[in-house]
Amino acid sequence: MKKYFKFCLIAITTFILCSCAATKTWKGTVQRVEKGKDGHTAYLVDQSGEKFDAVLSIPKMETNYRLLTVGEKVKLQGDTIHFDKRVRVLVRKIK
C-alpha cells in the first residue's frame, strides 16, 4: 500500500510539473483583435506562418498593458498554454 501511495504521488507530481505553463518569447503580426471584459485577445501569425493567440489582461499586466492593433508586429513574453489545438500566450510583457 505504501508503494502504491508513493507511485501515485510521483505520478501526480510529474503530471502537474509537465502540464505547467512555460514562459517564452513570441514574435508575430497581429491579424485580429477581440476586446473582452478586462483586456483583449489578439490573434497573431509568426514568421513561419504558425498561428497563435495572445491574451492581454489589464489586471495581470497592470502598467504593461496596451491595446494591440491589426498589422502591428510585436514581441510578447508570457506563459503558454494549449487550448483548442492552438497555443495561447498569457502575456506578461510587450516588447
Image (cartoon, rainbow, N blue to C red):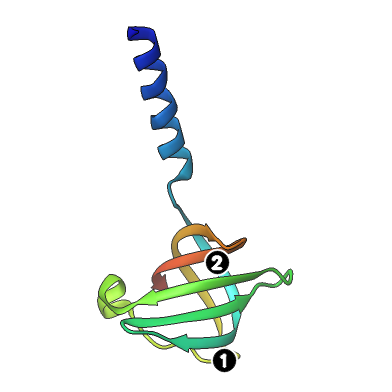
Q: Position of residue 67 (x, y in %)?
A: 41, 88
Q: Identify which residue is drawn at 37% across, 86% down.
A: 66
Q: Identify which residue is drawn at 70% across, 72% down.
A: 47
Res. 38 image quadrant: bottom left
Res. 13 image quadrant: top left
Q: First in sequence: mark 1 or mark 2?
A: 2
Q: Which mark is residue 23?
A: none
Q: Position of residue 33 (x, y in %)?
A: 51, 87
Q: Is residue 93 visible?
A: yes
Q: Is residue 17 left or right of residue 53?
A: left
Label total for image: 2
For mark 1, what is the residue? 70
Q: Is residue 4 left or right of residue 47?
A: left
The answer to whether mark 1 and mark 2 are in CB contact below 8 A is: no
Comparing labels 1 and 2, the label whose residue is closer to the camera: 1
Quadrant placement of the C terminus:
bottom left
Q: Amino acid at mark 1?
A: Val
Quadrant placement of the N terminus:
top left
Q: Is residue 8 left or right of residue 27?
A: left
For mark 2, what is the residue? 26
The answer to whether 48 is drawn above or below residue 10 in the figure is below
Q: Position of residue 20 (x, y in %)?
A: 43, 47
The answer to whether 10 is drawn above or below residue 16 in the figure is above
Q: Amino acid at mark 2?
A: Trp
Q: Circle 2 — which element? A: strand
Mark 1 Cα shell of 10 Å, populated few (<14), some (14-19), many (≥20): few
Q: Identify which residue is drawn at 35% across, 16% down.
A: 5
Q: Position of residue 43 (x, y in %)?
A: 57, 79
